Image (spheres, rainbow, N blue to C red):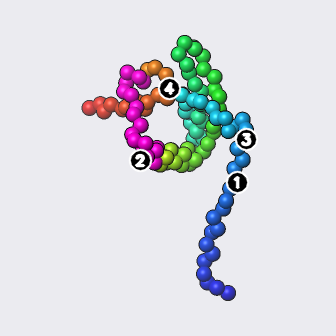
Amino acid sequence: MSNQQQQPQSQQINIELGEKEAEGIYSNLAIITHSPAEFVIDYTRILPGVPKAKVHARIIMTPQHAKMFLQAMKDNIKKYEDKFGEIKIHGDEMQNQFGFPLPVKEEKIH
């Protein structure tokens, strides 16, 4: 018998993309809520002059997967910006319009 440790084999996952899902869904607003057990992301879109928005997709994930998703997004944004240049985010004048809301900056109180 050999004392060598067995190396884990890399697992290949086949992912099926249906015709409907391949079309994609445009979203310019995500509502994120969480509990101790999960993060819920509702993707919607709001349009000028339309007072109501419909949720087009809801993704539910564990806190660990949410953090892994955040890291993957950061990595992909960095790769995108390295190739195409910095993604500009307009300042506060655009924040109250529509789209993904910018994170609220915490002010330090002395």
The residue shown at (54%, 28%) is: 28
Residue 64 forms part of the magenta stretch: no
Q: Earlier in the sequence, mark 4 or mark 2?
A: 2
Region in magenta? 77-95
Q: Which residue is mark 1?
A: 14
Q: Amino acid at mark 1?
A: Asn
Distance from disc 1 to disc 4, alpha carbons, whole Å, reads: 33 Å
Quadrant of the rendering where the N terminus is positioned: bottom right
Callout 1 touching callout 3 (CB < 8 Å): no
Distance from disc 2 to disc 3, alpha carbons, whole Å, reads: 31 Å
Residue 18 tag number? 3
Callout 4 touching callout 2 (CB < 8 Å): no
**55 versus 1 height, above or below:** above
**Residue sticking out furthest to the left:** 110
Residue 99 tag number? 4
- Residue 63 place in picture, x, y as percent: 56, 45
Q: Residue 4: name its quadrant.
A: bottom right
Residue 64 tag number? none
Distance from disc 4 to disc 3, alpha carbons, whole Å, reads: 27 Å
Q: Earlier in the sequence, mark 2 or mark 1?
A: 1
Callout 4 touching callout 3 (CB < 8 Å): no
The residue shown at (49%, 29%) is: 100
Callout 2 touching callout 3 (CB < 8 Å): no
In the image, taking residue 33 as reference, residue 16 lies left or right, namely right
**Residue sticking out furthest to the bottom:** 1
Callout 2 touching callout 1 (CB < 8 Å): no
Q: Amino acid at mark 2?
A: Asp
Residue count near mark 2 (Cα–Cα under 10 Å), binned few <14, some 14–19, many ≥20: few
Q: Which residue is mark 2?
A: 82
